[in-house]
Structures are given as C-alpha cells and as structure tokens.
C-alpha cells in the first residue's frame, strides 16, 4: 500500500486537467454545445471515457494522440481513463470490499495521516519493504506523468494554444514517462 495522499494528489491532478480540457473546448463555439451541456451536468471521468456527449471529443483526442497507439496497447483516451481508475482504486470505497485505503488509514490513526510504517510490507525485510514502497511510488508517479502529459499534449494540439516547439517538448516528456513506466514495470517483474 502507498500513502493514500499520493494517490489522491495524482488522481486530483489528472481529473482537473481533464475537466480543464473539456471546459476549454466547450467554450470554443456553437459546435461544442454538447460539451457545454455535459459539463454543466457535472464532469465524470467515466462519462468522459464512455458517454455519448463526449464521443466527438474522444475521437479528436485519440487522433491527436494517435502516435502513441502502438506504445499504449489501447486507444489513448481508454489509457487515460484506466490510469485515472488505477489511481482511484486505493482511495475509493468499493461495494463488497469495505473501506478504501484512505478511510482505513484514517480509522487507524484518528485525525492523523498514516505513518510510513503502515504503508510498508515487511515480508522481504525492512530494506525490501522500503524498496518496494519506492518502486510502487515511482510507478504511480510515472503513470500520472504519462497520463497528464497526454492530456496536456491533446489540449495544446486541439486548442492550438501552444506552438510546435512546445508540442514537441510535451511529446518528448510523454515518451520519457512511457519509457520510465516500462522500466519500472520491468523491474517490478524481475
């Protein structure tokens, strides 16, 4: 388990970027009336990934990020949604599963955040526990870097708010995050 506040911060950042992307595009003109209505009803990442109101936006995002398709193993929007869900699982309450990690931690230490020790798995000794925690933290951060970079790239591309040089810089950052995530997964499997 990782500190729940890490997941909460990473998820909040990704969700905020998605809302900002939709809001910026919804204000672009009458053609975006469907997005404006969807945003007024309240943004939901699940609805964004699957709902009819966002179908056109998903298509445009997938086109803007099409150069990543072979690397991700999924459509870019599906990957971003799965990243959001992955960052959400440890802090959400799931039916039949009881409390999420955040609620459990708050119950354990009333009014205080969880200690580092409560996030460690000591099965491999103290040193292994610390290495495992750092490896899981790196993977969560790499996943968030990749997803956030994808949203920012799509925003810049679709709104034409940044120049080609900035888009290329974002693209390099995305490729770096993708490589870091691959390396972290490889290390996890080894």
Image: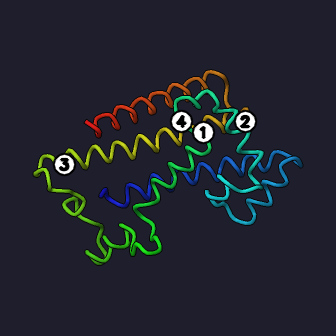
Q: CA distance from mark 2 to mark 1?
A: 15 Å
Q: Residue at x 66, y 39 (%)?
A: 155
Q: CA distance from mark 1 to mark 3?
A: 33 Å
Q: Position of residue 147 (x, y in %)?
A: 52, 42
Q: CA distance from mark 4 to mark 2?
A: 23 Å
Residue underneath mark 1:
76
22 relative position to 168: left or right: right
Q: CA distance from mark 3 to mark 2?
A: 42 Å
Q: Position of residue 39 (x, y in %)?
A: 73, 59
Q: Position of residue 59 (x, y in %)?
A: 73, 40
Earlier-in-chain disc, 4 versus 2: 4
Q: Are marks 4 and 3 in contact (CB under 8 Å)?
A: no
Q: Residue at x 65, y 52 (%)?
A: 49
Residue 76 versus residue 171 in the image, above or below: below
Q: Residues within 10 Å of mark 3 (few under 14, many from 20)?
A: some
Earlier-in-chain disc, 2 versus 1: 1
Q: Residues within 10 Å of mark 2 (few under 14, many from 20)?
A: some
Q: Residues within 10 Å of mark 1 (few under 14, many from 20)?
A: many
The residue furthest left is 125
The circle drawn on residue 73 is 4
- For numbered disc 4, what is the local secondary structure? loop
In the image, which is nearer the foreground, mark 1 or mark 3?
Answer: 1
Q: Position of residue 45 (x, y in %)?
A: 61, 56
The quadrant of the image that shows the N terminus is: bottom left
The circle drawn on residue 158 is 2
């Amino acid at each position: 388990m990782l500190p729940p506040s890490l997941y909460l911060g990473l998820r909040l950042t990704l969700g905020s970027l998605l809302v900002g992307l939709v809001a910026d595009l919804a204000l672009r003109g009458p053609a975006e009336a469907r997005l404006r209505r969807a945003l007024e009803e309240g943004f939901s990442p699940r609805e964004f990934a699957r709902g009819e109101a966002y179908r056109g936006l998903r298509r445009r995002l997938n086109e803007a990020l099409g150069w990543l398709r072979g690397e991700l193993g999924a459509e870019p929007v599906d990957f971003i949604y799965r990243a959001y869900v992955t960052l959400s699982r440890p802090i959400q309450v799931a039916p039949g599963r009881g409390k999420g990690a955040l609620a459990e931690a708050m119950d354990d230490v009333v009014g205080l955040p969880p200690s580092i020790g409560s996030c460690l798995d000591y099965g491999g000794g103290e040193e292994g526990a610390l290495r495992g925690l750092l490896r899981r933290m790196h993977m969560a951060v790499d996943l968030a870097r990749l997803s956030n970079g994808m949203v920012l790239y799509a925003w810049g591309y679709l709104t034409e708010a940044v120049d080609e040089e900035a888009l290329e810089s974002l693209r390099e950052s995305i490729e770096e995050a993708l490589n870091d995530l691959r390396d972290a997964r490889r290390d996890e499997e080894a």
